[in-house]
Image: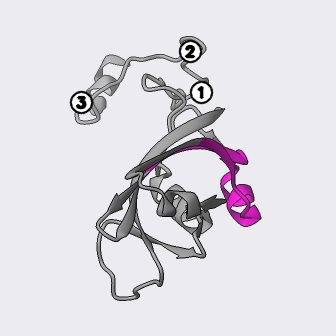
Amino acid sequence: MLINLKKFLLSDDLVMNINDTLTITDKELLETNKLNKEFLFEGKFYKVDKNVSLNAKITYAYDEVCARCLEEFENKVTANFNAIIVDEINEDYEAEDIEILMKDGLIDLNDAVNQIIYLSMPMKALCKDDCKGICSKCGKNLNTGKCECNDFVIDPRLEKLKTLLED
């Protein structure tokens, strides 16, 4: 995922927009997370003094299993991030912005995108916001209909009293 900034750096423009579909090349990332290869990259490069900064958004999709109903679905995630384009990486740099190395006017977004994907993946994903999950007794997916299980629940503190009615 190389982006050429040579023309932008030599021009008088202060902002460069990029809206493009890019491809993830890290096979381990793709297979481990069941990611779709292509993702949408929307970014603005800004010249600030003698530096270049990036405000970007990536939108990617991957196959996931719903945490409530256990059905497979395609989840789409949008993640915003900021980056600073640098000539050399500063190991002591501690800020919210990511550092992206530029060599000969080219920047490689692979590491930054991989990092953003790992950080933005939800811990639990739902197929839809109002997912009803599965019945804890029979295991039926409650999104497809109501199950036939008895909903009557006896308070465990009073359950012993039920034996008095059996006589």
Q: Position of residue 130 (x, y in %)?
A: 43, 22
Q: Which residues are magenta?
A: 20-44
Q: CA distance from mark 1 to mark 3?
A: 25 Å
Q: Are marks 2 and 1 in contact (CB under 8 Å)?
A: yes
* Residue 32, placed above or below residue 91: above
**Is 18 on the left or on the right of 21, as rendered?**
left
Q: Amino acid at mark 1?
A: Cys
Q: Residues within 10 Å of mark 2 (few under 14, many from 20)?
A: some
Residue that mark 2 sits on: 147
Residue at x 58%, y 37% (from the top left corner): 75
Q: Earlier in the sequence, mark 2 or mark 3?
A: 2
Is 22 within the magenta?
yes
Q: Nearer the viewer, residue 98 or 116?
A: 98
Q: Amino acid at mark 2?
A: Cys
Residue that mark 3 sits on: 158
Q: CA distance from mark 2 to mark 3?
A: 26 Å
Q: Position of residue 97 (x, y in %)?
A: 35, 66
Q: Residues within 10 Å of mark 3 (few under 14, many from 20)?
A: few
* Residue 102, placed above or below residue 33: below
| Disc ID at residue 28 | none
Residue that mark 1 sits on: 138
Q: Residues within 10 Å of mark 1 (few under 14, many from 20)?
A: few
* Residue 142, placed above or below residue 157: above
Is 34 within the magenta?
yes
* Residue 1, placed above or below residue 140: below
Residue 40, quarter of picture: top right
From the viewer's perspective, is the residue at label 1 or at label 3 nearer? 1
